[in-house]
Image (cartoon, helix red, strand yellow):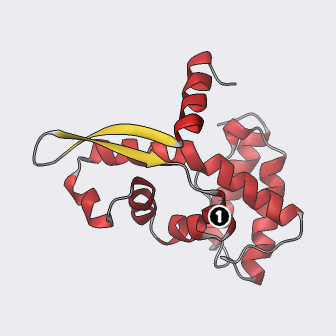
Amino acid sequence: MSTDLEAAQQAKDTLLGGRTVTVDLKKGGTEDVFVREATVREVIDDTYFNLLREDPMKLVAFMCGKPPAWLESISRASWAKLRQTEEDLNFDFALGEMKAALARGQKMKVIDDEADRQARRVLALLSVMPSQSAPKQLPDLSRPLEPAEAMRLRKQLAGSSSGQK
């Protein structure tokens, strides 16, 4: 359940199409960076998921309108703020679109047939669990899950469905 402050921030983010974050530069000083929401097209045509799967740094840089090398100029704490802001702005929307596409029987371009079957199983499990318990990091669905990944995901899903953390 979101608080009034979170709801107000979400409304402001939607109105502005993103959020401004002040980052600390390694050479000293700060910079205000606008982290934007992913467009519907970027989610639908798999641009978002490709970047998320291939290189989260490129995804964050893309959403900030910066070259990936720019991220090397900011502090680790600032990287964490940018990554969390990008996730807050985009992840739930993108996951919802993936669920909707799979529910319509539409295969996501970014994943092959085996990964598509795995994605459907994972999303079916995610759909029955409370959103606050859902893992924020999806496994790489472009390839079969490694046994250790599958076991970790199963334990996480089993723990969240029984009310454990």
Q: Residue at x 76, y 70 (%)?
A: 118
Mark 1: amino acid: Arg
Tag 1 secondary structure? helix
Relative to residue 161, is residue 17 drawn left or right? left
Outermost left residue: 27
Relative to residue 3, is residue 97 drawn left or right? right
Q: Quadrant of residue 99?
A: bottom right
User: Whole-percent x and y of residue 87?
Assistant: 53, 47
Q: Is residue 160 visible?
A: yes
83 lies above or below 54 = above
Near-viewer residue (52 or 165): 52
Q: Residue at x 67, y 62 (%)?
A: 151
User: Whole-percent x and y of residue 38?
Assistant: 57, 55
User: Whole-percent x and y of residue 137?
Assistant: 58, 54
158 lies above or below 55 = above
Near-viewer residue (5 or 144): 5
User: Whole-percent x and y of residue 93?
Assistant: 67, 49
Relative to residue 35, is residue 92 drawn left or right? right
Near-viewer residue (155 or 28): 28
